[in-house]
Every structure is written in C-alpha cells, then in structure tokens.
Amino acid sequence: MRVSKSLLVFGMAAALTGGAMAQDSALYFSPQLTSELTAPSAFEGLYAGVLLGAISSRKNNFNVGGEDIRPEFGGVIGWNQPVISGVVAGGEVQALLATDFSGSAYVRVMALARLGFAAGDNTLIYALGGIGYLGNSTAFEAGIGAEVMVTDNMALRLEAAGIGQIGPVPNGNNIPAISAMRITSGAIWQLDGPPASTSFNTGPVTNFSGLYAGINIGGLTDPNFNVFDDYGWGWHLSRFEMGGFAGYNFAPTDFIRAGIEAQVGVNYDTSGDAGMDLLALGRIGIVPMQGLMAYAAGGIGLAEGDGTYAFGGGVEYALWGQASLRGEALLLGRLDGQPGLTGVAGPSSSKVTIGTVWHFD
C-alpha cells in the first residue's frame, strides 16, 4: 500500500514537472485563446516602457509654486487582454516626475484602465481613465492614445489626457473640473517576446454596414459663446474634445448607407472650464469605392445642458478588416435660437474630430 502511494505521488510530481517543462518561457500565465478571441498578438499580455511628455496645470492647484507647464518623465507597466477580435481591454500604472529644473517638482502616479480598438496588426487606438495622485492632491484622468509597433517587441506611444482633482487641495484653490492636461510620448516593450503569426490582416475590408462603435478626439469651438458657459475662469473660445460613439448603418443598396448614431463627448481646457455634449444623429452616406464612405449627418442633443441641433458630415476610410479611420465636422446651434455673448445667433459653434471606428459586420 505504501509503495502504491509512493508511486502515485511520484507520478503526479513527474506529470507536473513535465507539464511545466513543456510550457513556453513566458513570464506569466498566458492561456491560449480561440481564434474568435484573438486580438493583434503585438498587444497581448505584459508590457513596460518609458514615458516622456509635457504637463500643464495653470491654476497652481496641483503644483504649489514653480512653472505651470513643465516636462515629466518616468515609466509604465501594464497588461493587455483580448476581449473580442480586434478589441483589447487592460490596465496599467504610470509613475512620472514633473520638474521645472528650478527646485520645483511633483509626481504623477496613476492607475489607469484602457479599452483599445485595433487599427491594423501593428496599431492600437485606445481610451483610458483612472485615478491616482498628482502633486498635492488625489486626481482623476481621462484621455485617448495610440500605439504603433515599430519592431517585433517595441511600440511607440502618443497619449493625451485631462486631469482633475478629487477633493480639496492644500492651497485651497479647488477646481471642480479638469484643470490640467498632459501630452505624453513613450516607448513600450512587449515582454511576451515577438508576436506570433496572426490572420488578422486577411479578408475583405468593411462595407460600412451594421453595428459599429469607436472613439474620437478633437476640438470644440464657440467663438460667439452660444454654447459655452463661464464657470468663473473667464470666457474661452475653444476646448479640447474627446469621446465615443456607437451606431448602426443600413445598406439599402451597394452604393448607399443610411443609419443612426449616438455621440457623447467631454470638452475641457486647463483653466477649469469643462462641459459635455450628447448628440443623436441621422446619417446618409455613399460608398463610391471599396473602403471609402462619405456621409452627411444631422440631429439634436444637448451641449452644456442646452438643447442643440447639429449638422455636418465626414469621411471614413477602411484600414483593413473591420477597422476604419474617420474625420468629422459638425456645426452646432441652440434650439431656442438665443444669441450668444456677442449677440450672434445661429449655428456658430463647431465640433471637429478624428477617430477610429470598429465595425461589427
């Protein structure tokens, strides 16, 4: 009986050892996914990198003394996990030091969640958001970025995010909105080694029909102040804009597309002014050639809490498979027809964005 037990234990140990030796040399457990859940292999698993950029905090609520705009440098470590084909979710921690090289410095440490859309085997466009610590206050971040693989293991990153304080700051200059912004570049190394082969680049490009979703970035301008409000930090003509959208396109013919879309955008500048726009749009477009769609759009919604109408259009260009790039310009006007601060009424505000679209067709 003892011999049998010893043989059993020895057999189990040998099986475990053999199984471990048979595994690859990955730094972490990495389960094999089915082809339906395979994201671009260049953006799977553990990664780390170095970051360098510029950060602006005009209200001096994060950095007590020193320059408002200063360089920051540090590092990042994170994990990407495929969600569905071409969509990646993940999280990372960034830690950077911002200094004006004259005795004033502060740190930014953020835990960020990311949601990315593949725009080719070597490109990822993503939205990010999270909380952490900046200077003398806890803070939140929201932004958008892109990574492009330039070698088998390394990607270059460009990222922009708005930052706002959570709770009071020591100097009492409390800003209840986004009051800082950063633009960050980086070099990111995939620690899982060179990417495996992938069939991601095969198949026809999207025909712009069916369900789609995406993220965008751009600007919102209001030269006659028909939309923007004064939150106590003065009147400003333009703000940074970022957000997302989702919609559905019908294909009554091979040439025509008609659909509906919902957009949500957050706009801000580093003075403390911030707002939101929500739009419901109808769209009509044409597909003059494979991989290209031009469309007109119009609808209603809210901007800064006021009823708003919008009209304009855009162009989508298919990159490969189900991903496309989009540029769009919309004019905005108040539904109540009230003039802005300058006495001018009508559609004098504009929203101009570029983005990436993922088609689920």
Image (cartoon, rainbow, N blue to C red):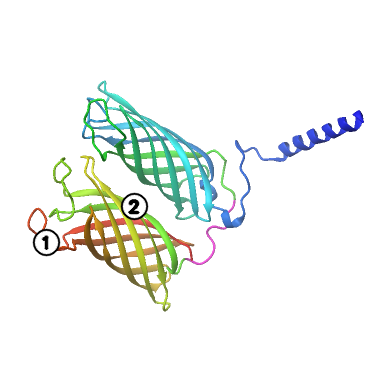
Q: Quadrant of residue 66?
A: top left
Left or right: 264, with 47 as reference point: left
- Graded by Cα atoms within 10 Å as few (under 14), some (14 to 19) or many (20 or more), the crowding at tag 2 reads many
Residue 189: image location, x then y, percent:
49, 39
Q: Amino acid at mark 1?
A: Ala
- Residue 232, percent across and down? 15, 41
Q: Residue at x 14, y 63 (%)?
A: 337
Residue type, numbered disc 2: Gly
Where residue 228 appears, x then y in whole percent?
18, 51
Disc sitting over residue 243 in the figure: 2
Q: Nearer the viewer, residue 335 or 130?
A: 335
Report helix, strand or loop for mark 1.
loop
Q: Residue at x 33, y 42 (%)?
A: 161
Which SS type dominates the magenta stretch?
loop
Q: CA distance from mark 1 to mark 2?
A: 26 Å
Q: Which residues are magenta?
A: 197-205
318 relative to 57 in the view: left or right: right
Mark 1 neighbour class, 10 Å CA radius: few under 14, some 14 to 19, many 20 or more: some
Pointers 1 and 2 in contact (C-beta within 8 Å): no
Q: Is tag 1's residue or tag 2's residue first in the polypeptide sequence?
A: 2
Q: Tell me the SS state at disc 2.
A: strand
**What residue is shown with label 1?**
345
The residue under the point 90% across, 28% down is 2
